[in-house]
Image (spheres, rainbow, N blue to C red):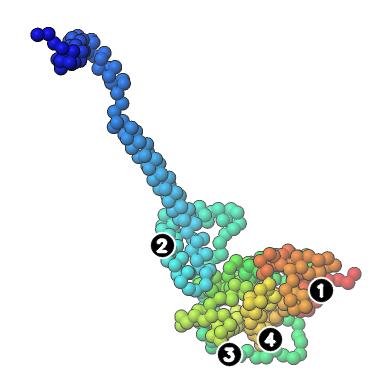
Amino acid sequence: MGATPTDPRTFHQPRRRLDEVTAVAMRTPTRRRALRQRQADRTVTAAQVPVRSTVASSFWRSASLRLVATCIFTLLCAALLNANALLKDAERKPFGPERDFWMATWTPLANASSVLYLDRPRAWLDQLTGHAPPRGIEPRTWVAGISSYANEWPAPPAKADEPEPLLRAPSVDDPLRLWAGGDSMSSAFGPALARMASETGLVAAAYDAELSSGLTRPDFFDWPAHFAEIATASQPEVFVILLGANDAQAIRAADGTVYQPETAGWIAEYRNRVQRVMTTLDAPGRVVIWVGLPIMETEGFSRRMAVQNEIYREEAARRKHVEYFDAWDLLGEDGRYSAFLDVEGTQQAVRTTDGVHLTKAGAELLARAVLQRIAVDAPALAPRSD
């Protein structure tokens, strides 16, 4: 019986023939290799795409990690190179948790920087550019024999009513020795006064300004010890002091007690430090001009400066060779702050934009007035009328 068209054997016959042809073709090695190559070229396995994605992702992750590591390493090197400056900035901060945090952060880095000599490049650069950091001075034994900040100073004798010459008559061959300085308020004033005094031909002047310094923070810069060193080393006959703008902050007494500005404890401790400086510098043949702080832009800051000025004024009045110079009205206008004043017939900016420091014009205005005050004790310095 013949097979019908619907016979399963007839239905699968073409497929069997195709398999037979393929099998015959695969018997030849050359044809087998060619067929396999064509199949390989046409086949893309599903695993190939994830592999490429994984490799790319791994590459970018590695690059990101390298970048983060490089940034961290760079910041660490920068911190080590500038550790001493960062530590000085922390020391300037007012007493409190913020200062303690930064001191704890930068002190180990500063120590490591010193051990590894990484602080040398910054120091060399500062010396080359003339921006050396404020120098610290170890406390020294005081002339008065008192080395603590305890408020135990005896009241000095009152000034004599009869005037007497306080300065010798200078000459070109033997000029007066003048020193001017203080904190950042003196950064423009000191050079201006030194230049004007030197132009008389009768004064050998020097100046010094230590930024961010003051009497409240001898742990940062010890002004009393510095004054004692200057008085002994160069023996100025005229001291002109302008400082205190940084002193309106908490002050720590010798027993560790911290007093806040404008409190009774703060005033007593600050007065004691002013007494210490004035007593050290008060000597025959010398005049100390303590320049009061000018009025400030903000009311609260001006009030604190006024408290300090009153201490300067009272303590200077008790000493024979110390004079207080009031700059409040000179650098203000009718008792108010003014950034612009009439200077030699023209309106000029006398204060910087921070409302505190002096511009070049303001420094020259103050220096000119102070020099006139010094001329009271050294008439040869007075400007000639001709």
Whether residue 162 is situated above or below residue 215 in the rendered picture: below
Tag 2: residue type? Answer: Pro
Query: Of the residues under marks 2 and 1, which one precedes in the sequence?
Result: 2
Cα separation, mark 3 vs mark 4, equals 15 Å
Which badge, 3 or 1, is on the more N-terminal residue?
A: 3
Which image quadrant is residue 215 in? Answer: bottom right
Q: CA distance from mark 2 to mark 1?
A: 55 Å
Instruction: List the single residue furthest toward the right.
Output: 386
Instruction: Choose mark 3 or mark 2, whichever is in front.
Output: 2
To which residue does mark 2 refer?
108
Rendering coords of residue 328 (x, y %) = 72, 77
Residue type at mark 4 is Ala
Residue 150: x and y in percent read: 51, 85
The mark found on residue 154 in the picture is 3
Please tell me which residue is depicted at 54% across the width and 85% down the height of the picture.
265
What is the spatial separation of the Cα atoms under label 3 and label 1, in whole angstroms? 36 Å
**Residue shown at the point (70%, 75%) measured from the top left:** 295
CA distance for labels 4 and 1:
24 Å
Residue type, label 1: Ala
Q: Residue at 46% of width from left, 52% of height from top?
A: 75
Residue 106, x across and y down, in percent: 45, 62
Contact check, label 4 and label 2, Cβ < 8 Å: no
Q: CA distance from mark 4 to mark 2?
A: 47 Å
Q: Earlier in the sequence, mark 3 or mark 4?
A: 3
Which picture quadrant has residue 350? Answer: bottom right
